[in-house]
Amino acid sequence: MPRSDHKVTIERAVLPNGLRVIASPDRSSALVGVAVVYDVGFRSEPEGRTGFAHLFEHLMFQGSAHVAKNEQTRQLEAAGGVFNGHTMADLTAYYEALPAMALELALWLEADRMGAPAVTEENLRNQIAVVEEEIKVNVLNQPYGGFPWIVLPELAFDTYPNAHNGYGDFSHLEEASVEDAVKFHRRYYAPRNAVLTVAGYCEPDDVFVLAERYFGGIPSAAAPPHGPWPEPPLPSARRRVIDDPLAPQPAFVIGLRTPDPVNHLDQHLAYAVAASVLGDGEASRLRSRLMHREQLVTDVGCMIGQFGGDNMLMRDPALFQVVVNHPGRATTDEIVSVIGEELSRLAETGPTEDELGRVEASFAGAYWKGVDSVMERSVAFASLEAVHGRAELLSELPDLLARVEPSSVQAAAADLASQSAAVVEVVPAGGQP
């Protein structure tokens, strides 16, 4: 596992068709992780086709030119591998981990579906039904379904890329055609819009030879435009109330703006530290006061992101979020006022040394655990390369966060305290906000 005092080994190549290839050898085990990350996510999907990025992720598992439906699964599992995929605000990733001797198989399978996924009417209709069922299970029939990752952006932003429902409206999904899917693939799944990473037991020169062998023949195309999609801060506060018949108690989320995670990473990290000081762990300020001392809430936490994604793997804009569940002993406005008091106090006095030490240790522990496996590491390398242009950030982020000055955290808190907030309340059906 890489550590902040051990810089990872990264070698790069770019194929003539524009595919960026990264190899990161690690011979601590005989496993290899393979990831292909495409620079497309919820925020890139066409207007009138909400949910299309996620739908296309499903289609990429339905076979390809030389691989029958379910054959990819069979071959990877027969080789001792595991695999998955996910869609985020700005990225879509496909990845697997398997014994190093099966690397060539993984690259062939990924190249075949990059070049020619099986986009047929049958597969499209089948996967639309699968996605709709997923939405029913995860959103429509769940307490707090879609809260806050779907409902907050719709209130906090005004432009389509930032504000629309990334899971998708049923009408948009059902109107999708094979022609739509083919156009989406040609536009966003070209080699120039992707990063291929191999991490683990590998020789970089061998990786580059195999990448050229299997991906080199895929036609080149211009990389499509992508974000950031900046928006000005809200001119005034916004609020929305949602009745939820399944919610056991009230909840709300506060959304505020952060600096650009890519072009102003140092400033953005100060907001991440502020979020952790306020709402990460039982010793955090909001949990200590709201949960343990005043017992006004049953849960409170802070995070930065949008659509549920990692804030380090997205472009501007991102949202600083305070998520609260409470039993109704106090009103939303009363709890929001307490949160404002704690933001102002952090702006006035800054974090303590103990708080900064706790944040640093907590972040480092969770971070290194998250990239411990070769599969997760390969995804992180490719994602950081796609968004930041620097896969090396994988080993640098904990140190960058540890260098955040108390004064920067104060400035971040002061800015957050001064902003007009977007607040979404969830009210149990028949209750009062």
Image (spheres, rainbow, N blue to C red):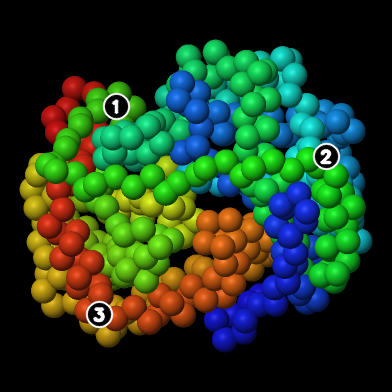
Return the disc, 2 or 3, that comes first in the chain's sequence: 2
Q: Which residue carries the number 2 mark?
A: 112
Q: Distance between the residues labelled 1 and 3?
A: 40 Å
Q: Which residue carries the number 1 mark?
A: 244
Q: Are marks 2 and 3 in contact (CB under 8 Å)?
A: no
Element type at mark 2? helix
Return the disc, 2 or 1, that comes first in the chain's sequence: 2
Q: Distance between the residues labelled 2 and 3?
A: 50 Å
Asked if residue 432 shows in the view, the reply is yes
The residue located at (25%, 80%) in the rendering is 406
Judged left or right of residue 426, residue 37 is right
Q: How far apart are marks 2 and 1 (CA)?
A: 44 Å
| Neighbours of disc 1 within 10 Å: few (<14), some (14-19), many (20+) | many
Q: Quadrant of residue 239?
A: top left
Return the disc, 1 or 3, that comes first in the chain's sequence: 1
Judged left or right of residue 159, residue 345 is left
Query: Where residue 266 sits in the image (x, y, percent)?
Result: 37, 71
Residue 406: which disc? Answer: 3
Given the image, on which type of amino acid does mark 2 rest? Asp
- Considering the image in quadrants, where does the C terminus appear? top left
Q: In this view, does 397 lie above or below 382?
A: below
- Considering the image in quadrants, where does the N terminus appear? bottom right
Q: In which quarter of the image is residue 423?
A: top left
Q: In this view, does 267 lie above or below 428?
A: below
Query: Where residue 48 sits in the image (x, y, percent)?
Result: 46, 21
| Neighbours of disc 3 within 10 Å: few (<14), some (14-19), many (20+) | many
Given the image, on which type of amino acid does mark 1 rest? Asp
Asked if residue 364 shows in the view, the reply is no
Element type at mark 3? helix
